[in-house]
Image (tube, rainbow, N blue to C red):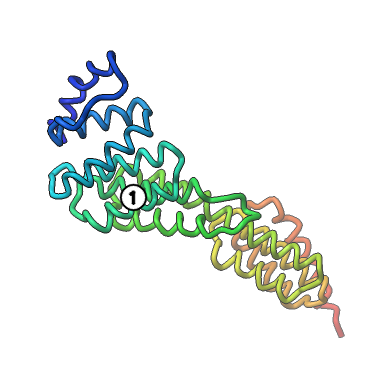
């Protein structure tokens, strides 16, 4: 790889004359350096052709994983995230000793992150992104990109939690109360570290009161007070708890 980087300076000279070169007579290393230069200059169409040619023509070469990684990166650069994910997966599965393994795993997750849609839509890619970022963290815990992966997992989990939370609210309004309780509980259990967990518990408490399940509402309000002392709804929940306790204490 060091030799390849050194060649980039030489290759860049030729770009002053032409954006494309006859690569058929180049050594594999020179051709790779030329292809990387294409990628860096965002001549992605030509870069894809060259990286694919290198992979096909030099399957046993020491530069094959370089070409595979940069092919995937070029697909990512072109915002072809499904194709990029496929190419990163090929490197991870087929070249487990590659120096690009950690970066490929992060970028695989990043492909699904980019594919993750608005919370109102199907969240298949969102879940896949969380899964792949977690694989990256588990296998490369000392990598400098772990912090970035953790931030993105939090963002993605917030999106998943919001989808569940909004579903619960819809069921609540439609008076499908069993479904509403189920979705509120799911937010609290699966996405307990997101901003939607206390909101789900708050809504559940109010729904329990509306359904005249005051004993259950009392238990849930006590949970809220214990878990979320700094939440904006804390005082409201405390008032609810006090009213329920007062009501229960005067019951004959």
Label tally: 1
- Image quarter where the C terminus lies is bottom right
Q: Residue furthest top?
A: 16
From this view, report whether residue 145 is shown above or below residue 86.
above
- Label 1 crowd (10 A; few <14 / some 14-19 / many >=20): many
Quarter of the rendering occupied by the N terminus? top left
The x and y percentages for residue 108 are 38, 50
Residue matched to label 1: 87
Residue 54 horizontal side relative to residue 83, left or right: left
Check disc 1 and report its element: helix, strand or loop.
helix
Query: In the picture, residue 181 is in which quadrant?
Result: bottom right
Q: Is residue 130 left or right of residue 165?
A: left
Which residue occupies the foreground of this view, 140 or 123? Answer: 123
Is residue 241 shown to the viewer in this render? no
Q: Position of residue 192 (x, y in %)?
A: 55, 62
Q: Quadrant of residue 15?
A: top left
Q: Residue at x 37, y 46 (%)?
A: 107
Say above or below: 139 vs 183: above
Locate residue 117, reporting x and y percent.
Answer: 57, 50
Please name whichever residue, 184 or 2, is drawn nearer the observer in this view of the structure: 2
Could you tell me if residue 88 is visible in this image? yes
Where does residue 40 sit, x and y in percent of width and height? 33, 28
Q: What residue is rendered at 60% in x and 65% in y?
A: 188
> Which of the 4 quarters of the picture holds residue 197?
bottom right
Closest to the observer, 169 or 87: 87
**Above-or-below relation of 103 to 204:** above
* Residue found at x 81% / y 71%: 175
Residue with the most extreme bottom position: 252
């Amino acid at each position: 790889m060091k030799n390849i980087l050194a060649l980039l300076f030489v290759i860049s000279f030729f770009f002053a004359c032409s954006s494309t070169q006859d690569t058929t007579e180049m050594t594999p290393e020179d051709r790779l350096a030329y292809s990387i230069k294409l990628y860096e200059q965002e001549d992605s169409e030509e870069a894809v052709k060259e990286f694919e040619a290198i992979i096909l023509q030099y399957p046993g070469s020491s530069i094959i994983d370089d070409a595979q990684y940069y092919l995937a990166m070029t697909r990512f650069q072109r915002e072809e995230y499904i194709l990029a994910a496929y190419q990163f997966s090929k490197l991870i599965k087929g070249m487990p000793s590659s120096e690009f393994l950690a970066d490929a795993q992060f970028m695989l997750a990043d492909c699904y992150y980019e594919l993750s849609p608005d919370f109102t839509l199907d969240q298949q890619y969102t879940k896949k992104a969380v899964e792949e970022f977690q694989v990256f963290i588990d296998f490369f815990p000392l990598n400098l990109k772990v912090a970035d992966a953790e931030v993105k997992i939090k963002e993605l989990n917030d999106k998943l939690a919001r989808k569940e939370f909004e579903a619960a609210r819809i069921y609540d309004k439609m008076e499908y109360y069993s479904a509403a309780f189920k979705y509120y509980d799911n937010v609290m259990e699966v996405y307990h570290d997101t901003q939607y967990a206390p909101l789900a518990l708050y809504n559940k408490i109010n729904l329990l009161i509306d359904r005249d399940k005051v004993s259950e509402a009392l238990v849930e309000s006590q949970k809220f007070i214990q878990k979320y002392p700094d939440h904006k709804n804390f005082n409201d929940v405390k008032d609810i708890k006090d009213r329920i306790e007062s009501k229960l204490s005067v019951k004959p």
